[in-house]
Image (cartoon, rainbow, N blue to C red):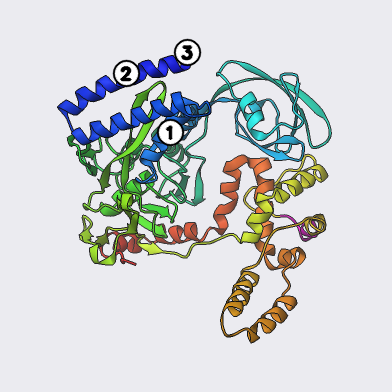
């Protein structure tokens, strides 16, 4: 028996003894099932016809145990700990750049502003030729990423080819890269500040505090827009500290309740607010979740802000982590959270998921609550904004062009044609001739895209085959033959959205992620609606004191 299996056998004996003691002192059913699991792993590891890896058996068993629970409860093996740390802290050791694959080489897709890659002169579109002297031709993005990441303070030698054909070899000192939780702070009008908050990773409160202080130093702050659209949440404690900037010290902003006594807690703000009375607008959408909903929902319940946008995602579950030994971890749902009005905004009921019954909260079980000023609000599925707006979607065609790399490839070509160009971030747009060049660039490209019309026609043809309306099939085929759905036609149909996608790529090359956000603000309808409210103090006061928030 080799060392790995001797260790397994020894561990099995210890586990069996522990299970026997546990079962005697606690729940017999739990102890019995734990013993069955250990016995099964031992038999498979030692007696299965082919050699099996005990680690993979354990990962499979752990994944199976949580598969019928909610999607937020998961087993994190040792190899997944680095990704988990990045998710919770937003930090990793590396050079600070996004990468993408193009043909036989990996290229720089975006260096983070001020990162080691950025300071070393690496640019969007650079082809990575070699890493530490090893030819990088044929490397995947995973292979390149693993070689660029490493312990902070260590060095990596990177050879690249720039878009103009020149080559550069840079020895880059890796650092602790922190992906900003607040990618942009600025002004959207005279006296009206704007902060984009993208996630609740460790330390994002300090970023938010710094953003507020920067605005206060730059000018008179008369109102503030907090943008939580597409913020998927994160660390709950960061949300509580952020709320402390806007409401009185000691204000209850959150409570949690689960099965254990430890899960029953009340959270209050612990610091004096820096902006106790400043008019606030919070932007949310269907992808605003978890901690983002805590901030938005608490500010609404306390009548401290006007919410604009679409109903939020509806995640009212709290996760905690438990170490399992050997650098593994269990992330599990331990409680539900409740915002100041007493409502829980969890949209999906997972309580019967083990029986395969996952459902949204029915209207009959939705309850009415009131804000501090007596406005009606409801539980059962996300935060409903005070002012609802229609979501703006980019076309699937434009997204397909971006996903296939055609937008970035054209951006590379545009940059080659315009060396040393300077642009106005807010007003930049490519010319009609530039777009004609893009259409020419796309002539020999295959785009796997079907319009909604063509997809609907296919469905109708299939239905005609299956029922008594087969005579309609010929008519559908005639319409389909006349339907213009080629790439060049779609480039005209979706011209405006494709142009904006190209604009964003070029702006990124000059102004990083912050530049793209700044470029989008003048045409952002939700931001413009926020300005309308903040520039009308009487309307602002009316909304936070009188207006009912509709259920649907």
- Magenta span covers which residues? 430-436
* Residue 476 in the image: above or below residue 65: below
Query: Residue 113's image quarter?
Result: top right
Provide the residue designation for mark 3.
Answer: 3
**The magenta stretch spans residue 226:** no
Q: Position of residue 303 (x, y in %)?
A: 27, 54
Q: CA distance from mark 1 to mark 3?
A: 36 Å
Residue 326 in view in this figure:
yes
For disc 3, the neighbor class at 10 Å (few under 14, some 14 to 19, many from 20) is few
* Residue 69 in the image: above or below residue 76: below
The total number of labels drawn is: 3
Q: CA distance from mark 2 to mark 3?
A: 16 Å
- The reply to whether dot 1 and dot 3 touch (C-beta < 8 Å) is no
In the image, 201 versus 79, the foreground residue is: 79
- Quadrant in the picture for the C terminus: bottom left
Q: Which mark is residue 472?
A: none
Q: Indicate the secondary structure of the residue bearing disc 2.
A: helix
Residue 548 in view in this figure:
no
* Residue 283 in the image: above or below residue 106: below
Q: Position of residue 136 (x, y in %)?
A: 74, 28
For disc 1, the neighbor class at 10 Å (few under 14, some 14 to 19, many from 20) is some
Task: Give the residue displayed 67% in from the left and 47% down from the top.
Answer: 505
Task: Give the residue displayed 53% in from the left and 28% down from the top.
Answer: 50
Q: Earlier in the sequence, mark 2 or mark 3?
A: 3
Q: Indicate the secondary structure of the residue bearing disc 3.
A: helix
Q: Which mark is residue 13?
A: 2
Q: CA distance from mark 1 to mark 2?
A: 36 Å
- The reply to whether dot 2 and dot 3 touch (C-beta < 8 Å) is no
Provide the residue designation for mark 1.
Answer: 88
- Look at discs 1 and 2 and give the one toward the viewer: 2
- Look at discs 1 and 3 and give the one toward the viewer: 3
């Amino acid at each position: 028996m080799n060392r790995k299996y001797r260790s397994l056998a020894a561990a099995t004996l210890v586990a069996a003894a522990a299970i026997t003691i546990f079962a005697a002192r606690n729940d017999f059913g739990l102890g019995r099932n734990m013993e069955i699991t250990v016995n099964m792993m031992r038999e498979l590891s030692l007696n299965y016809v082919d050699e099996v890896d005990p680690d993979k058996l354990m990962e499979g068993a752990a994944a199976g145990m949580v598969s019928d629970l909610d999607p937020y409860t998961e087993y994190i093996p040792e190899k997944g700990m680095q990704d988990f740390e990045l998710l919770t802290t937003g930090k990793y050791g590396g050079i600070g750049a996004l990468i993408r694959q193009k043909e036989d080489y990996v290229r720089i897709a975006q260096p983070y502003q001020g990162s080691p890659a950025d300071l070393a002169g690496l640019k969007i579109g650079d082809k990575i030729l070699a890493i530490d002297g090893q030819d990088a031709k044929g490397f995947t993005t995973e292979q390149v990423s693993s070689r660029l990441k490493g312990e902070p303070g260590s060095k990596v030698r990177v050879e690249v080819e720039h878009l103009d054909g020149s080559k550069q070899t840079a020895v880059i000192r890796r650092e602790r890269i922190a992906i900003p939780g607040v990618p942009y702070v600025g002004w959207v009008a005279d006296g009206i500040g704007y902060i984009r908050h993208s996630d609740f990773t460790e330390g994002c409160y300090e970023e938010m505090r710094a953003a507020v202080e920067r605005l206060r130093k730059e000018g008179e702050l008369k109102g503030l827009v907090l943008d939580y659209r597409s913020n998927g949440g994160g660390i709950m404690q960061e949300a509580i500290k952020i709320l402390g900037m806007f409401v009185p010290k000691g204000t209850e902003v959150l409570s949690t309740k689960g099965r254990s006594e430890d899960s029953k807690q009340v959270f209050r703000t612990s610091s004096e607010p820096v902006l106790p009375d400043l008019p606030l607008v919070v932007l949310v959408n269907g992808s605003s979740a978890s901690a983002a909903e805590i901030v938005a929902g608490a500010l609404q319940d306390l009548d401290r802000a006007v919410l604009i946008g679409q109903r939020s995602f509806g995640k009212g579950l709290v996760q905690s982590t438990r170490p399992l030994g050997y650098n593994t971890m269990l992330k599990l749902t331990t409680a539900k959270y409740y915002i100041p009005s007493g409502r829980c905004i969890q949209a999906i009921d997972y309580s019967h998921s083990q029986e395969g019954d996952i459902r949204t909260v029915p209207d009959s079980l939705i309850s009415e609550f009131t804000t501090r000023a007596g406005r009606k609000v409801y539980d059962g599925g996300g935060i409903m904004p005070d002012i609802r707006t229609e979501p703006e979607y980019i076309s699937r065609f434009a997204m397909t062009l971006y996903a296939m790399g055609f937008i970035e490839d054209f951006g590379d070509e545009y940059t080659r044609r315009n060396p040393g160009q300077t642009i106005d971030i807010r007003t930049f747009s490519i010319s009609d001739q530039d777009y004609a060049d893009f259409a020419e660039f796309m002539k020999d490209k295959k785009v796997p895209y079907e319009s909604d019309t063509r997809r609907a026609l296919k469905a109708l043809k299939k239905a005609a085959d299956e029922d008594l309306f087969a005579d309609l099939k010929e008519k559908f085929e005639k319409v389909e033959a006349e339907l213009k759905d080629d790439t060049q036609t779609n480039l005209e149909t979706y011209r405006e959205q494709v142009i904006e996608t190209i604009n964003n790529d070029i702006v990124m090359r000059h102004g990083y992620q912050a530049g793209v956000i700044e470029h989008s603000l003048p045409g952002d309808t939700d931001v413009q609606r926020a300005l309308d409210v903040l520039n009308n103090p009487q309307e602002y006061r009316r909304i936070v004191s009188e207006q009912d928030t509709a259920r649907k």
